[in-house]
Image (cartoon, rainbow, N blue to C red):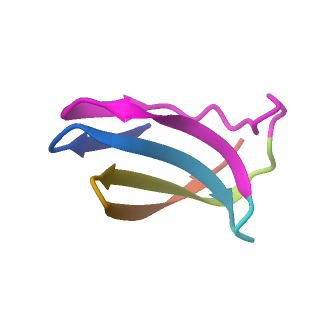
């Protein structure tokens, strides 16, 4: 479960990347109002196929005006 907060209305992206830096899946890419959000990644890629167990990175991008803030988090996927 990935939980994040947004202090003001912003364009938000939340994507999962492999340990090699390849994008696996984009969970959200939308304008969101300020608030607390949570998202569950089900261990699948953009095509709905299960990915292998291992280390992945969730990258949260928040764009307000001309400022973009990116926050990474490690995810250990085990099956």
Q: Nearer the viewer, residue 13 or 66?
A: 66
Percent from the top left, x then y, of residue 60? 43, 53
User: Which image quadrant: the N terminus?
Assistant: top left
Tell me the quarter of the picture where residue 2 sits. top left
Residue at point 63%, 31% (across, down): 42
Asked if residue 77 is among those painted magenta in the image, a careful observer would answer no
Q: Residue furthest bottom?
A: 20
Percent from the top left, x then y, of residue 67? 30, 63
Asked if residue 39 is among those painted magenta in the image, a careful observer would answer yes
Residue 45, above or below 66: above
Residue at point 18%, 34% (across, down): 34
Please state if 38 lies on the left or on the right of 78 as rendered. left
Percent from the top left, x then y, of residue 56? 63, 59
Tell me the quarter of the picture where residue 71 sits. bottom left
Span shown in magenta: 23-50
Q: Residue furthest left?
A: 7
Residue 41, above or below 14: above
Residue at point 30%, 43% (across, down): 4
């Amino acid at each position: 479960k990935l939980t994040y907060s947004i202090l003001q209305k912003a364009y938000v992206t939340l994507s999962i990347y492999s340990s090699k830096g390849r994008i696996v899946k984009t969970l959200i890419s939308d304008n969101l109002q300020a608030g607390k959000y949570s998202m569950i990644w089900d261990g699948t890629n953009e095509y709905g196929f299960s990915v292998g167990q291992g280390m992945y990175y969730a990258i949260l991008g928040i764009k307000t005006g001309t400022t973009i803030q990116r926050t990474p988090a490690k995810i250990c996927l085990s099956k």
